[in-house]
Amino acid sequence: MECVCLRSRGDVNLFFTMNKERIFVFDTTLRDGEQVPGCQLTTQEKIEIARGLALLGVDVIEAGFPVSSPGDFNSVREISLLLNEMYKNREISEIPTVCGLTRAVEKDIEVAADALKYAAKPRIHTGIGASDFHIQYKFNSTREDILRRGVHAVRFAKKFVDDVEFFCEDAGRADNLFLAQLVEAVIDAGATVVNIPDTTGYCIPDEYGQKIKFLRENVKNIDKAIISVHCHNDLGLATANSLAGIRNGARQVEVTINGIGERAGNTSLEEIVMILKTHKNLGFETRINTPQIYPMSLKVSRLMNMPVQPNKAIVGRNAFAHSSGIHQDGVLKNALVYEIIDHKDVGVPDNAILLTARSGRAALRYRLEKLGFRLSKEQIDEIYPKFLEMADRRKDVNDGDLLELMGVAKPTEDIQIKLLGLNVVCGKISTLPMAAVQMEYKGEIITETATGNGPVDAAFKAINKIVTVNAELDEYVIQSMSKGSDDEGRVYVKLLFDGQAYFGFGESTDVVLASAMAYIDALNKII
């Protein structure tokens, strides 16, 4: 049994005593995550994400870098007020710490303190480079000067808040003896948390774990602070390194939703949390409300315009999908055969049995039974070759295709929608984007126009005037297939109709045309 202490504003100490060791989750989606090009957020969007993070149960929200812009300053302040209101209204049982990042500069620290003045549990996160790369090339300085500046920054921050986290930037490549000296000095100065970031994603798990262990064994006052791990994913090792750090004594892990962040990203919240939850024998726990993970992933993806790759662990759309016949048979007998996590534990509504040419008879029987068809083994054997022919032709087989296979629906070829022409007008400030489409639908050539909040939206609305299907656009993803201004783009759409998902794909150097093709591809499968 271990007693862990966190310091907050005033002289109040919060103690957590438990059989499993508590790992504090520090979320930096709104700071490190927002540094991704194209992912910048308005204050209102940051507030929406902060609300979700509070409901998710993170312990610390790094809300921004207050001195960097008026927007970041205001976001930190507004998030502090939001969390106070949520706690007052009993939406949350515990207020997360609100953290503001600074450099080891007095002005940065003063501005952060001002931004945090309404926070019930404020934290200033200050620090400086610890590796010789940073000391020599970034600061043109010496180790002695870095020590002095680090200690001064912590002492100055302590004038405003009790909870001060110090980051040793590029600790992953820092000399361990100097790193230990720096950590000891800033803890003496009053740091309550010391962050040992693998800023460049350089370390491998054994090396990083040993670095944390070295600090635990060689910093005489290390028991007076919490060690935090902050790992980047340049070599694909962020989660593995964070786990190694935890197993060697770190008790705070710094993460982002979907693993977004500088360059290749940060440690993914969903990955590290579910590793600790799945491997209970490790003896660690968080207070994350895991069924909120998937909804939070969708929210961040939508607001930051950052699609989640389909094979992303935990939250990718294929994370609980099965198309291989062998896997489908196993999952249908018992999900534990191929799923180590219950999809409901992370908020995913259901696992998916996707029918493709690789699917077996068990999956076909399962999907037909959901449509009300009870077939004998002999009947399944009879239609299975026809199913494979259909799957080879259409790639993925949906419920409408199965109805056709059973002879209760017309072949989709008889009612296929064809795009004959597309023209869009956009770019003028005073004119709404407009699209005109010409399509062949049920043997008739029809032309329609529509306006929208963008050329793609206008194209979809024009198509909807012709094909009046009440389908909901659930996902829209653009992927670049190559580099350059003339690259080909692939568009993926997911439509929801009558409780089922339908997928469409389109490829073109014209992204609006590819979008229309993908949308019509999905509609064809519905109709």
Image (cartoon, grey):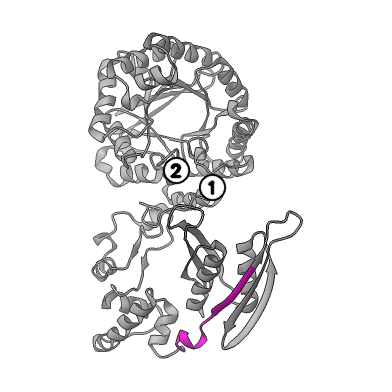
Q: Is residue 46 left or right of residue 233?
A: right
In the image, residue 221 sits, relative to residue 241, either above or below, namely: above
The image quarter containing residue 432 is bottom right
Alpha carbons under labels 1 and 2: distance apart: 10 Å
Q: Position of residue 54 (x, y in %)?
A: 52, 40
In the image, residue 86 sits, relative to residue 462, either above or below, namely: above
Relative depth, front residue between 216 and 471? 471
Is disc 1 placed on a helix, strand or loop?
A: loop
Query: The magenta stretch spans which residues?
Result: 410-423
Residue carrying label 2 = 260
The image quarter containing residue 316 is bottom left
Query: CB atoms at circles 1 and 2 under 8 Å apart?
Result: yes
Q: Is residue 506 left or right of residue 215?
A: right
Relative depth, front residue between 484 and 427? 484
- Give neighbour class at mark 1: few <14, some 14-19, many 20+ (Cα, 10 Å): many
Residue carrying label 1 = 304
Label of residue 63 in the image: none
Q: Is residue 87 left or right of residue 139?
A: right
Relative depth, front residue between 81 and 28? 28
Q: Position of residue 53 (x, y in %)?
A: 51, 42
In the image, residue 31 sits, relative to residue 447, either above or below, namely: above
